[in-house]
Image: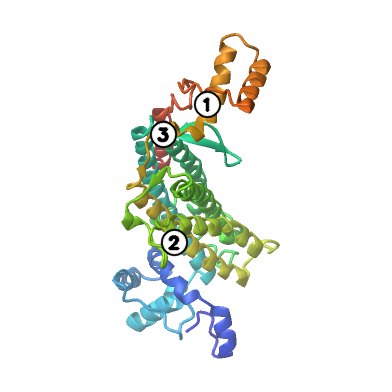
């Protein structure tokens, strides 16, 4: 069944090519299509396009379909083009002519649009919650290990003293930046496109304000052409948010892979969170974090994929827009899995204490030793030269007393300030 059928069939190859993976992907948005259809049916009854009895019957029928979806008993067989045609078929099978009335005053275009907006809005909210859980964990780890020193690197060469507290809280604060992107994507998806039909509105006296409130959108896309143009844009905005989160997780995963290696040996995890080798019995591989790194690298390419797909399309609907689902849906699922596994694993991280007591890290203290000379009255450039000569001739003696007191340094992590920044963002998000 196709919503656009006019009494003739398309070639099987054309059908297979044009439908693509829509049936599988539509199972993801099926609950949202039901929700939007319920609001649409209620609106049709409110404005008198159908009777109140028909509106009630449609709502009851859609609720039954919603239960099938929730229980995992809903399928989209090959003879249906997509979720929309299957739902309309089930309604018609149960309600007869009343079922056929559900499509009045809407197009499959705004059906997809509103279902995707609802789906993206919900997924962004879930991702936001998961990020906040990870943030809280990182901040608690930062507080627990704030006094445990760690080598800092530039160019992968030992540079200056750092700490596990500085490392954990760096990623916590970076997640706040990522949440700004998630929040921005939420505002873009939190606009109701239903009622734009094929992108040019309808001659029916529909009530778009009603469906906006019924579906829990904070506002609507007023201009019907602008509503149609949000297809692809909402996905791309979401992808940019996903990419930002993925960049943070990918960098953290890379640090963990380095720090777990024997050459660094800063951290480890319980055996059950690592994998072994088929021939090397000593191996404890960070496969989880390697996969997080790889998956997050893929996710960072999603905005570009969507940009390439939608660039240079004029206003109005084009079939390429169907392909946005097969890019954005798997990316969302992958990112959520990466956040979940990062949080799960970090709860069990084991850090090594007294790392900097190893003499190979003596030069980490060269800058602090140099700064002490400056504080004693030696001009910086002279102190720098003196320190360089001492390092070169082997007479350098590190001063291991760390006195970093400025905001955001080893000795002043400002964890409460970072938490306050997140609390402010949380308050803003609750007001949405």
Q: Secondary structure at mark 2?
A: helix
Residue 210 visible in image = no
> Label 2 vs label 1: CA separation?
44 Å
Residue 64 seen in the current view: yes
Callout 3: helix, strand or loop?
helix
Q: Quadrant of the C terminus?
A: top left
Residue ID for mark 3: 165
The picture quadrant where one finds residue 203 is bottom right
The picture places residue 164, in percent across and down from the top left corner, at 42, 36
The image shows residue 47 at horizontal and vertical percentages of 42, 63
Expressed as whole percent of the image width and height from the top left, the position of residue 260 reads 43, 48
Q: Is residue 138 above or below residue 331?
A: above
Residue, disc 2: 333
Labels 3, 2: front one = 3
Label 3: few (<14), some (14–19) or many (≥20) C-alpha neighbours in 10 Å: many
Q: Quadrant of residue 140?
A: top left
In primary-sequence order, the first of circles 3 and 1 is 3
Residues at marks 3 and 2, CA–CA distance in whole angstroms: 30 Å
In the displayed structure, 138 sits above or below 312; it is: above
Category of crowding for the residue at label 2, using alpha-carbon neighbours closer than 10 angstroms: few (below 14), some (14–19), many (at least 20): few
**For mark 1, what is the residue?**
365
Between residues 342 and 386, which one lies in front from this camera angle? 386
Image coordinates of residue 216 in percent, x first then y, are 40, 53
Estimate how packed mark 1 is, as few (under 14), some (14 to 19) or many (20 or more) residues with alpha carbons within 10 Å: many
Left or right of 347, for residue 193: right
Quadrant of the rendered image containing residue 200: bottom right
Q: Secondary structure at mark 1?
A: helix
Q: Nearer the viewer, mark 2 or mark 1?
A: 1
Residue 350 is labelled as none
């Amino acid at each position: 069944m196709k919503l656009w059928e006019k009494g003739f069939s398309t070639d099987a190859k054309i059908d297979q090519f044009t439908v693509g993976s829509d049936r599988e992907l539509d199972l993801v948005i099926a609950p949202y299509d039901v929700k939007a259809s319920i609001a649409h049916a209620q609106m049709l009854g409110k404005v008198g396009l159908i009777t109140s009895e028909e509106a009630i019957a449609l709502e009851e029928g859609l609720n039954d379909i919603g239960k099938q979806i929730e229980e995992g008993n809903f399928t989209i067989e090959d003879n249906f083009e997509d979720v929309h045609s299957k739902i309309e078929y089930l309604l018609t099978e149960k309600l007869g002519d009343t079922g056929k009335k559900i499509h009045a005053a809407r197009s499959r275009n705004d059906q997809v649009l509103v279902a995707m907006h609802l789906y993206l809005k919900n997924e962004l909210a879930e991702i936001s919650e998961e990020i906040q859980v990870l943030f809280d964990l990182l901040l608690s780890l930062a507080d627990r290990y704030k006094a445990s020193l760690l080598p800092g690197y530039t160019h992968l060469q030992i540079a200056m003293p750092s700490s596990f507290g500085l490392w954990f809280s760096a990623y916590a604060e970076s997640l706040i930046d990522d949440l700004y992107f998630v929040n921005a994507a939420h505002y873009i998806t939190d606009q109701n496109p239903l009622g734009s039909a094929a992108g040019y509105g309808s001659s029916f006296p529909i009530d778009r304000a009603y469906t906006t409130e019924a579906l829990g959108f904070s506002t609507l896309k007023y201009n019907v052409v602008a509503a149609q143009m949000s297809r692809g844009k909402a996905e791309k905005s979401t992808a940019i948010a996903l990419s930002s989160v993925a960049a943070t997780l990918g960098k953290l995963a890379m640090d963990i892979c380095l720090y777990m290696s024997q050459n660094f040996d800063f951290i480890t995890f319980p055996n059950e969170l690592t994998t072994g080798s088929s021939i090397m019995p000593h191996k404890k591989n960070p496969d989880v974090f390697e996969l997080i790194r790889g998956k997050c690298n893929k996710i960072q390419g999603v905005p570009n994929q969507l940009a390439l797909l939608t660039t240079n399309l004029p206003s109005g609907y084009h079939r390429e827009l169907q392909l946005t689902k097969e890019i954005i849906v798997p990316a969302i699922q992958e990112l959520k899995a990466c956040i979940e596994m990062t949080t799960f694993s970090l709860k069990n991280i084991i850090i090594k204490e007294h790392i900097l007591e190893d003499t190979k890290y003596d030069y980490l203290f060269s800058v602090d030793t140099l700064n002490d000379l400056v504080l004693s009255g030696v001009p910086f450039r002279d102190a720098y030269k003196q320190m360089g000569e001492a390092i070169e001739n082997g007479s350098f003696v590190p001063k291991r007393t760390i006195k970093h007191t400025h905001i955001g340094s080893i000795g002043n992590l400002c964890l409460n300030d970072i938490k306050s920044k997140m609390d402010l963002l949380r308050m803003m998000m609750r007001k949405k």
